[in-house]
Image (spheres, rainbow, N blue to C red):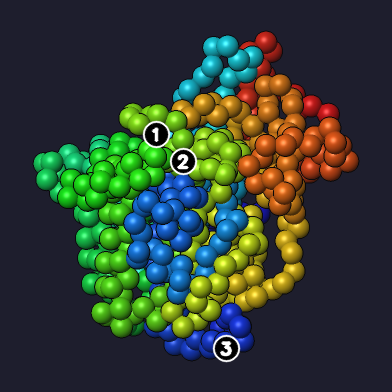
Protein backbone atom coordinates (compact mmCIF):
# COMPACT_ATOMS: atom_id res chain seq x y z
CA UNK A 1 0.00 0.00 0.00
CA UNK A 2 1.35 3.39 -0.93
CA UNK A 3 2.32 5.99 1.59
CA UNK A 4 0.29 9.15 1.98
CA UNK A 5 0.74 12.37 3.86
CA UNK A 6 -1.15 10.96 6.82
CA UNK A 7 1.71 8.56 7.50
CA UNK A 8 3.50 8.85 10.79
CA UNK A 9 6.93 10.41 10.37
CA UNK A 10 9.52 7.67 10.30
CA UNK A 11 12.29 7.80 12.89
CA UNK A 12 15.85 7.62 11.65
CA UNK A 13 17.52 4.38 12.72
CA UNK A 14 21.26 4.54 12.44
CA UNK A 15 22.98 1.26 11.82
CA UNK A 16 26.51 0.73 10.61
CA UNK A 17 26.59 1.00 6.84
CA UNK A 18 29.31 -0.67 4.86
CA UNK A 19 30.22 1.91 2.25
CA UNK A 20 32.37 0.75 -0.69
CA UNK A 21 35.26 -1.55 -0.04
CA UNK A 22 34.98 -2.09 3.72
CA UNK A 23 34.80 1.57 4.71
CA UNK A 24 32.74 1.78 7.91
CA UNK A 25 30.49 4.80 8.31
CA UNK A 26 28.69 5.45 11.61
CA UNK A 27 26.41 8.52 11.53
CA UNK A 28 25.68 9.64 15.07
CA UNK A 29 24.35 13.19 15.25
CA UNK A 30 21.56 14.93 13.37
CA UNK A 31 23.96 17.16 11.47
CA UNK A 32 25.94 14.10 10.40
CA UNK A 33 23.12 12.77 8.26
CA UNK A 34 24.38 13.10 4.70
CA UNK A 35 23.46 16.18 2.78
CA UNK A 36 22.06 15.37 -0.67
CA UNK A 37 22.64 17.33 -3.87
CA UNK A 38 20.61 15.81 -6.69
CA UNK A 39 21.38 17.30 -10.12
CA UNK A 40 18.94 16.43 -12.91
CA UNK A 41 19.43 17.49 -16.52
CA UNK A 42 16.72 17.61 -19.17
CA UNK A 43 17.13 15.48 -22.32
CA UNK A 44 20.86 14.89 -21.77
CA UNK A 45 21.78 11.82 -23.79
CA UNK A 46 23.80 8.80 -22.72
CA UNK A 47 26.70 9.74 -25.03
CA UNK A 48 26.85 13.48 -24.24
CA UNK A 49 29.53 13.62 -21.52
CA UNK A 50 33.29 13.32 -21.75
CA UNK A 51 33.20 10.62 -19.08
CA UNK A 52 30.88 8.62 -21.36
CA UNK A 53 33.19 8.90 -24.36
CA UNK A 54 32.17 12.21 -25.95
CA UNK A 55 35.24 13.93 -27.42
CA UNK A 56 33.44 17.09 -28.58
CA UNK A 57 31.45 18.33 -25.58
CA UNK A 58 33.54 19.77 -22.73
CA UNK A 59 32.30 18.65 -19.30
CA UNK A 60 35.31 18.74 -16.94
CA UNK A 61 33.36 19.30 -13.72
CA UNK A 62 30.87 16.48 -14.30
CA UNK A 63 33.73 14.23 -15.44
CA UNK A 64 35.54 15.07 -12.22
CA UNK A 65 32.58 13.69 -10.24
CA UNK A 66 32.84 10.49 -12.28
CA UNK A 67 36.58 10.28 -11.66
CA UNK A 68 36.10 10.77 -7.94
CA UNK A 69 32.95 8.66 -7.59
CA UNK A 70 30.92 5.92 -9.22
CA UNK A 71 29.85 5.94 -12.87
CA UNK A 72 27.03 3.67 -14.06
CA UNK A 73 26.96 2.31 -17.60
CA UNK A 74 23.44 0.82 -17.48
CA UNK A 75 21.35 3.43 -15.68
CA UNK A 76 17.75 3.79 -16.83
CA UNK A 77 14.82 6.11 -16.38
CA UNK A 78 11.34 4.70 -15.83
CA UNK A 79 10.05 6.53 -18.90
CA UNK A 80 11.44 7.89 -22.18
CA UNK A 81 9.88 11.33 -21.49
CA UNK A 82 10.23 13.83 -18.68
CA UNK A 83 7.12 14.08 -16.49
CA UNK A 84 6.68 10.35 -15.77
CA UNK A 85 10.43 10.00 -15.27
CA UNK A 86 10.26 12.72 -12.61
CA UNK A 87 7.37 10.92 -10.94
CA UNK A 88 9.53 7.83 -10.51
CA UNK A 89 12.46 9.83 -9.19
CA UNK A 90 10.48 11.84 -6.64
CA UNK A 91 8.12 9.11 -5.39
CA UNK A 92 9.93 5.81 -5.93
CA UNK A 93 6.73 4.64 -7.64
CA UNK A 94 6.52 3.59 -11.29
CA UNK A 95 4.62 6.24 -13.32
CA UNK A 96 2.33 3.57 -14.81
CA UNK A 97 1.05 2.93 -11.30
CA UNK A 98 0.46 6.63 -10.71
CA UNK A 99 -1.19 6.97 -14.13
CA UNK A 100 1.09 9.79 -15.28
CA UNK A 101 2.49 8.27 -18.47
CA UNK A 102 3.33 11.24 -20.72
CA UNK A 103 4.78 14.73 -20.46
CA UNK A 104 2.01 17.07 -19.39
CA UNK A 105 1.36 18.74 -22.74
CA UNK A 106 1.88 15.58 -24.79
CA UNK A 107 -1.22 15.26 -26.98
CA UNK A 108 0.09 13.90 -30.26
CA UNK A 109 -2.11 11.41 -32.13
CA UNK A 110 -1.69 9.55 -35.41
CA UNK A 111 -4.61 9.69 -37.83
CA UNK A 112 -3.20 6.68 -39.70
CA UNK A 113 -3.02 4.51 -36.58
CA UNK A 114 -5.74 2.15 -35.39
CA UNK A 115 -5.26 3.33 -31.79
CA UNK A 116 -5.35 6.57 -29.82
CA UNK A 117 -3.49 7.39 -26.59
CA UNK A 118 -5.16 6.47 -23.28
CA UNK A 119 -8.05 8.60 -22.12
CA UNK A 120 -7.46 8.16 -18.41
CA UNK A 121 -3.85 9.19 -17.90
CA UNK A 122 -3.14 11.68 -15.12
CA UNK A 123 -2.11 15.32 -15.63
CA UNK A 124 0.20 16.12 -12.75
CA UNK A 125 1.49 14.49 -9.59
CA UNK A 126 -1.32 14.16 -7.05
CA UNK A 127 -0.41 15.80 -3.76
CA UNK A 128 -1.40 12.62 -1.91
CA UNK A 129 1.81 10.84 -2.92
CA UNK A 130 4.75 11.26 -0.59
CA UNK A 131 7.67 12.85 -2.39
CA UNK A 132 11.34 12.45 -1.59
CA UNK A 133 11.28 16.03 -0.27
CA UNK A 134 8.43 15.22 2.13
CA UNK A 135 10.16 12.09 3.33
CA UNK A 136 13.42 13.93 3.96
CA UNK A 137 11.61 16.82 5.62
CA UNK A 138 10.20 14.30 8.10
CA UNK A 139 13.79 13.16 8.66
CA UNK A 140 14.83 16.68 9.66
CA UNK A 141 16.15 17.93 6.32
CA UNK A 142 15.97 21.42 4.88
CA UNK A 143 14.68 20.93 1.34
CA UNK A 144 15.24 23.01 -1.77
CA UNK A 145 14.01 22.83 -5.35
CA UNK A 146 15.40 24.81 -8.28
CA UNK A 147 14.45 24.67 -11.95
CA UNK A 148 12.07 22.67 -14.14
CA UNK A 149 9.17 21.02 -12.30
CA UNK A 150 6.78 19.76 -15.02
CA UNK A 151 4.61 17.79 -12.59
CA UNK A 152 1.61 20.09 -12.64
CA UNK A 153 0.69 23.51 -11.29
CA UNK A 154 -2.80 22.91 -9.95
CA UNK A 155 -3.46 23.31 -6.26
CA UNK A 156 -1.42 20.79 -4.29
CA UNK A 157 0.92 19.95 -7.19
CA UNK A 158 3.55 22.68 -6.95
CA UNK A 159 6.96 22.10 -5.34
CA UNK A 160 6.20 24.36 -2.36
CA UNK A 161 3.19 22.10 -1.72
CA UNK A 162 5.17 18.89 -2.21
CA UNK A 163 7.68 19.17 0.62
CA UNK A 164 10.15 21.82 -0.53
CA UNK A 165 10.93 24.64 1.93
CA UNK A 166 12.78 26.64 -0.74
CA UNK A 167 11.36 26.67 -4.29
CA UNK A 168 12.55 28.47 -7.41
CA UNK A 169 10.41 27.00 -10.20
CA UNK A 170 10.50 27.95 -13.88
CA UNK A 171 6.98 29.26 -14.44
CA UNK A 172 6.99 30.85 -17.90
CA UNK A 173 8.86 30.33 -21.18
CA UNK A 174 10.52 27.17 -19.98
CA UNK A 175 11.72 26.42 -23.53
CA UNK A 176 13.54 29.73 -23.76
CA UNK A 177 16.76 30.58 -21.96
CA UNK A 178 15.90 34.28 -21.80
CA UNK A 179 12.60 36.09 -21.16
CA UNK A 180 11.49 33.45 -18.66
CA UNK A 181 10.02 33.81 -15.19
CA UNK A 182 10.79 32.04 -11.90
CA UNK A 183 8.20 31.54 -9.16
CA UNK A 184 9.84 32.04 -5.78
CA UNK A 185 8.03 29.93 -3.15
CA UNK A 186 4.73 30.58 -4.89
CA UNK A 187 3.21 32.52 -7.77
CA UNK A 188 2.92 35.75 -5.77
CA UNK A 189 6.63 36.52 -6.15
CA UNK A 190 8.16 36.20 -9.62
CA UNK A 191 11.56 36.92 -11.05
CA UNK A 192 11.07 37.93 -14.68
CA UNK A 193 14.02 38.04 -17.04
CA UNK A 194 14.17 40.83 -19.59
CA UNK A 195 16.40 38.96 -22.00
CA UNK A 196 19.71 39.47 -20.19
CA UNK A 197 20.18 36.69 -17.61
CA UNK A 198 20.94 33.24 -19.03
CA UNK A 199 18.55 30.74 -17.44
CA UNK A 200 21.07 28.00 -16.65
CA UNK A 201 23.28 30.50 -14.82
CA UNK A 202 20.28 31.90 -12.95
CA UNK A 203 19.34 28.43 -11.73
CA UNK A 204 22.88 27.85 -10.52
CA UNK A 205 22.73 31.13 -8.59
CA UNK A 206 19.50 30.00 -6.91
CA UNK A 207 21.17 26.73 -5.94
CA UNK A 208 24.06 28.61 -4.39
CA UNK A 209 21.59 30.87 -2.58
CA UNK A 210 20.01 27.81 -1.00
CA UNK A 211 23.41 26.40 0.01
CA UNK A 212 24.40 29.70 1.61
CA UNK A 213 21.33 29.50 3.86
CA UNK A 214 22.31 26.09 5.26
CA UNK A 215 23.55 25.69 8.81
CA UNK A 216 25.43 22.86 10.45
CA UNK A 217 22.58 21.77 12.71
CA UNK A 218 20.42 20.40 9.87
CA UNK A 219 21.16 18.31 6.80
CA UNK A 220 19.84 19.49 3.45
CA UNK A 221 18.40 18.11 0.23
CA UNK A 222 18.78 20.28 -2.87
CA UNK A 223 17.09 19.14 -6.07
CA UNK A 224 18.76 21.04 -8.91
CA UNK A 225 16.54 20.42 -11.92
CA UNK A 226 18.23 22.11 -14.87
CA UNK A 227 16.11 22.74 -17.97
CA UNK A 228 19.18 22.40 -20.21
CA UNK A 229 20.02 21.01 -22.67
CA UNK A 230 16.34 20.72 -23.66
CA UNK A 231 15.41 22.51 -26.89
CA UNK A 232 15.29 25.41 -27.76
CA UNK A 233 19.02 25.25 -28.44
CA UNK A 234 20.01 28.67 -27.13
CA UNK A 235 23.58 28.80 -25.81
CA UNK A 236 25.52 31.65 -24.28
CA UNK A 237 27.30 33.43 -27.11
CA UNK A 238 30.66 33.46 -25.32
CA UNK A 239 30.66 29.64 -25.12
CA UNK A 240 29.70 28.89 -28.70
CA UNK A 241 32.76 29.95 -30.69
CA UNK A 242 35.17 27.19 -29.70
CA UNK A 243 32.65 24.52 -30.69
CA UNK A 244 32.15 26.14 -34.08
CA UNK A 245 35.91 26.18 -34.60
CA UNK A 246 36.22 22.44 -34.04
CA UNK A 247 32.91 21.44 -35.69
CA UNK A 248 34.50 20.22 -38.93
CA UNK A 249 37.14 18.18 -37.07
CA UNK A 250 34.29 15.79 -36.15
CA UNK A 251 32.70 15.70 -39.62
CA UNK A 252 29.57 17.49 -38.47
CA UNK A 253 28.62 14.76 -36.00
CA UNK A 254 28.00 17.13 -33.09
CA UNK A 255 25.87 20.23 -32.54
CA UNK A 256 27.91 23.25 -31.35
CA UNK A 257 24.93 25.03 -29.75
CA UNK A 258 23.99 21.90 -27.82
CA UNK A 259 27.60 21.46 -26.65
CA UNK A 260 27.73 25.04 -25.39
CA UNK A 261 24.49 24.54 -23.45
CA UNK A 262 25.90 21.44 -21.79
CA UNK A 263 29.03 23.38 -20.87
CA UNK A 264 26.86 25.90 -19.00
CA UNK A 265 25.36 23.03 -16.99
CA UNK A 266 28.87 21.77 -16.33
CA UNK A 267 29.89 25.22 -15.08
CA UNK A 268 26.91 25.11 -12.74
CA UNK A 269 27.89 21.72 -11.38
CA UNK A 270 31.39 23.02 -10.74
CA UNK A 271 30.07 26.11 -8.95
CA UNK A 272 27.77 24.09 -6.70
CA UNK A 273 30.51 21.63 -5.75
CA UNK A 274 32.87 24.52 -5.07
CA UNK A 275 30.23 26.13 -2.83
CA UNK A 276 29.99 22.93 -0.83
CA UNK A 277 33.75 22.62 -0.56
CA UNK A 278 34.25 26.22 0.54
CA UNK A 279 31.66 25.76 3.30
CA UNK A 280 33.25 22.51 4.48
CA UNK A 281 30.17 20.50 3.47
CA UNK A 282 31.44 18.44 0.55
CA UNK A 283 32.71 15.49 2.58
CA UNK A 284 29.24 14.96 4.05
CA UNK A 285 27.30 15.47 0.83
CA UNK A 286 26.05 12.76 -1.49
CA UNK A 287 26.02 14.14 -5.05
CA UNK A 288 23.91 12.44 -7.71
CA UNK A 289 24.03 13.53 -11.36
CA UNK A 290 21.77 12.12 -14.08
CA UNK A 291 19.23 12.90 -16.84
CA UNK A 292 15.45 12.54 -17.00
CA UNK A 293 15.43 10.59 -20.29
CA UNK A 294 17.39 10.07 -23.49
CA UNK A 295 18.52 12.83 -25.81
CA UNK A 296 16.62 14.28 -28.75
CA UNK A 297 17.56 12.54 -32.00
CA UNK A 298 15.28 14.23 -34.55
CA UNK A 299 14.88 17.90 -35.51
CA UNK A 300 12.50 19.56 -33.04
CA UNK A 301 12.28 23.34 -32.88
CA UNK A 302 15.64 23.44 -34.63
CA UNK A 303 18.52 21.17 -35.68
CA UNK A 304 19.14 17.69 -34.25
CA UNK A 305 20.79 18.13 -30.84
CA UNK A 306 22.69 14.87 -30.35
CA UNK A 307 23.86 11.54 -31.72
CA UNK A 308 23.27 8.57 -29.40
CA UNK A 309 25.00 5.82 -31.37
CA UNK A 310 25.48 2.96 -30.70
CA UNK A 311 22.13 3.12 -28.87
CA UNK A 312 18.98 2.77 -30.92
CA UNK A 313 16.49 5.66 -31.17
CA UNK A 314 16.15 8.53 -28.66
CA UNK A 315 13.73 10.37 -26.39
CA UNK A 316 10.13 9.18 -26.69
CA UNK A 317 11.09 5.58 -27.55
CA UNK A 318 11.43 2.54 -25.29
CA UNK A 319 14.58 1.54 -27.15
CA UNK A 320 17.86 2.10 -25.30
CA UNK A 321 18.41 5.59 -26.70
CA UNK A 322 15.22 6.76 -25.01
CA UNK A 323 15.67 5.26 -21.57
CA UNK A 324 19.39 4.67 -20.92
CA UNK A 325 21.05 7.74 -19.38
CA UNK A 326 24.29 8.86 -17.75
CA UNK A 327 24.36 8.48 -13.95
CA UNK A 328 27.14 9.44 -11.55
CA UNK A 329 27.12 9.17 -7.75
CA UNK A 330 29.85 10.96 -5.82
CA UNK A 331 30.60 11.06 -2.12
CA UNK A 332 34.04 12.32 -1.24
CA UNK A 333 35.98 9.80 0.80
CA UNK A 334 33.14 7.27 0.90
CA UNK A 335 33.21 5.67 -2.57
CA UNK A 336 36.22 4.31 -4.40
CA UNK A 337 37.26 6.92 -7.00
CA UNK A 338 36.69 6.09 -10.64
CA UNK A 339 34.64 2.97 -10.10
CA UNK A 340 32.51 1.85 -13.07
CA UNK A 341 29.41 -0.24 -12.34
CA UNK A 342 27.70 -2.23 -15.08
CA UNK A 343 24.69 -3.43 -13.03
CA UNK A 344 21.44 -2.00 -14.35
CA UNK A 345 18.96 0.01 -12.30
CA UNK A 346 16.17 2.54 -12.80
CA UNK A 347 15.56 6.02 -11.42
CA UNK A 348 12.82 4.89 -9.03
CA UNK A 349 15.75 3.36 -7.11
CA UNK A 350 17.11 6.72 -5.95
CA UNK A 351 14.39 7.10 -3.32
CA UNK A 352 15.09 3.60 -1.99
CA UNK A 353 18.83 4.28 -1.95
CA UNK A 354 18.46 7.46 0.08
CA UNK A 355 16.05 5.77 2.46
CA UNK A 356 18.48 2.87 2.86
CA UNK A 357 21.27 5.32 3.63
CA UNK A 358 19.25 7.08 6.31
CA UNK A 359 17.31 4.26 7.97
CA UNK A 360 18.58 0.99 6.54
CA UNK A 361 15.51 0.23 4.44
CA UNK A 362 16.50 -1.29 1.08
CA UNK A 363 13.07 -1.41 -0.59
CA UNK A 364 10.80 1.58 -1.15
CA UNK A 365 7.67 1.13 -3.26
CA UNK A 366 8.89 0.17 -6.77
CA UNK A 367 12.54 0.97 -6.06
CA UNK A 368 15.50 -0.95 -4.67
CA UNK A 369 18.56 0.46 -2.94
CA UNK A 370 21.76 0.86 -4.94
CA UNK A 371 23.94 0.55 -1.84
CA UNK A 372 24.50 -3.21 -2.22
CA UNK A 373 25.95 -2.84 -5.71
CA UNK A 374 27.88 0.29 -4.75
CA UNK A 375 29.25 -1.69 -1.81
CA UNK A 376 30.68 -4.18 -4.26
CA UNK A 377 28.11 -6.94 -4.62
CA UNK A 378 29.23 -9.33 -7.33
CA UNK A 379 25.81 -10.89 -7.78
CA UNK A 380 24.59 -10.31 -11.35
CA UNK A 381 21.18 -8.66 -11.48
CA UNK A 382 18.25 -10.69 -12.76
CA UNK A 383 15.66 -8.18 -11.66
CA UNK A 384 12.86 -7.16 -14.01
CA UNK A 385 12.63 -3.49 -15.05
CA UNK A 386 9.53 -2.17 -16.81
CA UNK A 387 8.68 0.71 -19.14
CA UNK A 388 5.26 1.85 -20.28
CA UNK A 389 4.75 4.60 -22.84
CA UNK A 390 1.27 4.24 -24.40
CA UNK A 391 1.53 7.50 -26.36
CA UNK A 392 2.75 8.96 -29.64
CA UNK A 393 5.82 11.05 -28.89
CA UNK A 394 6.97 14.28 -30.51
CA UNK A 395 10.05 12.31 -31.53
CA UNK A 396 7.92 9.79 -33.48
CA UNK A 397 7.85 7.08 -30.83
CA UNK A 398 4.77 4.85 -30.98
CA UNK A 399 2.82 3.30 -28.07
CA UNK A 400 4.79 0.48 -26.48
CA UNK A 401 5.76 -1.21 -23.25
CA UNK A 402 8.99 -3.00 -22.43
CA UNK A 403 10.73 -5.24 -19.91
CA UNK A 404 14.38 -5.99 -19.22
CA UNK A 405 15.41 -9.04 -17.21
CA UNK A 406 19.06 -10.01 -17.13
CA UNK A 407 20.58 -9.50 -20.58
CA UNK A 408 17.22 -9.76 -22.38
CA UNK A 409 14.83 -6.96 -23.29
CA UNK A 410 11.36 -7.34 -24.81
CA UNK A 411 9.42 -4.48 -26.41
CA UNK A 412 5.68 -4.84 -27.07
CA UNK A 413 3.93 -2.54 -29.57
CA UNK A 414 0.29 -1.90 -28.72
CA UNK A 415 -1.02 -1.22 -32.22
CA UNK A 416 0.32 -4.34 -33.95
CA UNK A 417 0.74 -6.67 -30.97
CA UNK A 418 4.26 -7.38 -32.24
CA UNK A 419 7.05 -8.27 -29.84
CA UNK A 420 10.74 -7.57 -30.35
CA UNK A 421 13.38 -9.35 -28.29
CA UNK A 422 17.01 -8.29 -27.90
CA UNK A 423 20.06 -9.57 -26.06
CA UNK A 424 21.60 -6.33 -24.80
CA UNK A 425 24.88 -7.95 -23.80
CA UNK A 426 25.50 -8.98 -27.40
CA UNK A 427 23.45 -6.32 -29.18
CA UNK A 428 23.40 -2.95 -27.42
CA UNK A 429 22.12 -1.36 -30.64
CA UNK A 430 18.98 -3.53 -30.59
CA UNK A 431 19.52 -4.44 -34.21
CA UNK A 432 18.83 -8.19 -34.14
CA UNK A 433 15.28 -9.13 -33.20
CA UNK A 434 15.38 -12.62 -31.69
CA UNK A 435 11.68 -12.92 -30.99
CA UNK A 436 11.26 -15.93 -33.29
CA UNK A 437 14.62 -17.54 -32.48
CA UNK A 438 14.17 -17.39 -28.67
CA UNK A 439 10.46 -18.02 -28.27
CA UNK A 440 10.72 -19.42 -24.74
CA UNK A 441 12.46 -16.27 -23.48
CA UNK A 442 10.05 -14.09 -25.47
CA UNK A 443 7.01 -15.78 -23.93
CA UNK A 444 8.43 -15.67 -20.41
CA UNK A 445 9.14 -11.94 -20.62
CA UNK A 446 5.81 -11.19 -22.26
CA UNK A 447 3.98 -13.04 -19.48
CA UNK A 448 5.83 -10.94 -16.86
CA UNK A 449 5.18 -7.69 -18.74
CA UNK A 450 1.52 -8.45 -19.40
CA UNK A 451 0.87 -9.36 -15.77
CA UNK A 452 2.67 -6.21 -14.64
CA UNK A 453 0.52 -4.02 -16.91
CA UNK A 454 -2.60 -5.60 -15.42
CA UNK A 455 -1.34 -5.45 -11.82
CA UNK A 456 -0.42 -1.75 -12.05
CA UNK A 457 -3.67 -0.84 -13.84
CA UNK A 458 -1.50 0.92 -16.41
CA UNK A 459 -3.41 3.26 -18.76
CA UNK A 460 -3.74 1.52 -22.13
CA UNK A 461 -4.20 2.96 -25.63
CA UNK A 462 -7.72 3.07 -27.00
CA UNK A 463 -8.83 1.06 -30.04
CA UNK A 464 -10.47 3.37 -32.57
CA UNK A 465 -12.66 0.48 -33.69
CA UNK A 466 -14.11 -0.41 -30.28
CA UNK A 467 -13.54 2.80 -28.31
CA UNK A 468 -12.15 0.66 -25.50
CA UNK A 469 -8.65 -0.08 -24.23
CA UNK A 470 -6.70 -2.37 -26.52
CA UNK A 471 -6.73 -6.09 -25.77
CA UNK A 472 -3.25 -7.38 -24.92
CA UNK A 473 -2.15 -10.18 -27.23
CA UNK A 474 -1.49 -13.70 -26.07
Residue at the outermost right position = 440
Q: Looking at the image, which residue is at 35% across and 45% down?
A: 249
Q: Can residue 131 be seen here?
A: no
156 lies left or right of 132:
left
Distance Cα–Cα, label 3 vs label 1: 47 Å
Q: Nearer the viewer, mark 3 or mark 1?
A: 1
35 lies left or right of 358:
left
Circle 1 crowding by C-alpha within 10 Å: few under 14, some 14–19, many from 20: some
The mark that comes first in sequence, 3 or 1, is 3
Depth check: give the residue in front, 48 or 253. Answer: 253
- Quadrant containing the N terminus in the rendered view: bottom right
Q: Position of residue 359 (x, y in %)?
A: 57, 76
Q: Looking at the image, which residue is at 42% across and 69% down?
A: 65
Q: Give the residue at mark 1.
A: 304
Q: Secondary structure at mark 2?
A: loop
Q: Position of residue 447 (x, y in %)?
A: 81, 40
The answer to which image quadrant residue 458 occupies is top right
Q: Are marks 2 and 1 in contact (CB under 8 Å)?
A: yes
Q: Looking at the image, which residue is at 36% across and 59% down?
A: 59
Distance Cα–Cα, label 2 vs label 1: 8 Å
Circle 3 crowding by C-alpha within 10 Å: few under 14, some 14–19, many from 20: few
Circle 2 crowding by C-alpha within 10 Å: few under 14, some 14–19, many from 20: many
Q: Which mark is residue 307?
A: 2
Q: Secondary structure at mark 1?
A: loop
Q: Is residue 248 above or below residue 414?
A: below
Q: Give the residue at mark 3.
A: 24
- Quadrant containing the C terminus in the rendered view: top right
Q: Position of residue 159 (x, y in %)?
A: 36, 52
Depth check: give the residue in front, 158 or 405. Answer: 405
Distance Cα–Cα, label 3 vs label 2: 42 Å
Q: Is residue 180 above or below residue 72?
A: above
59 lies left or right of 357:
left
Amino acid sequence: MYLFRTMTALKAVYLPLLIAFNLNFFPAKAQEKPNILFILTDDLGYTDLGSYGNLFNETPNIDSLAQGGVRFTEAYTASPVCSPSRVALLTGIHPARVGLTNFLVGKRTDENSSIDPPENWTLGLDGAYVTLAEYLSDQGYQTGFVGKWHLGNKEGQNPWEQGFDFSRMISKNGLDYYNYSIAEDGFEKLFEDDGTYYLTDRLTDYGQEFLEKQKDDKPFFLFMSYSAPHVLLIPRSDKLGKYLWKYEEFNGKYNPSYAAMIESVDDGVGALVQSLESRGMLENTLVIFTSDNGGVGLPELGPIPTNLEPLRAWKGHNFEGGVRVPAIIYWKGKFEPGRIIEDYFTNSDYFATIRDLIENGEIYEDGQSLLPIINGSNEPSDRALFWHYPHFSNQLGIPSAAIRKGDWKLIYFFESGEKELYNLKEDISEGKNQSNAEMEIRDELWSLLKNWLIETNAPLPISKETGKPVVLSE
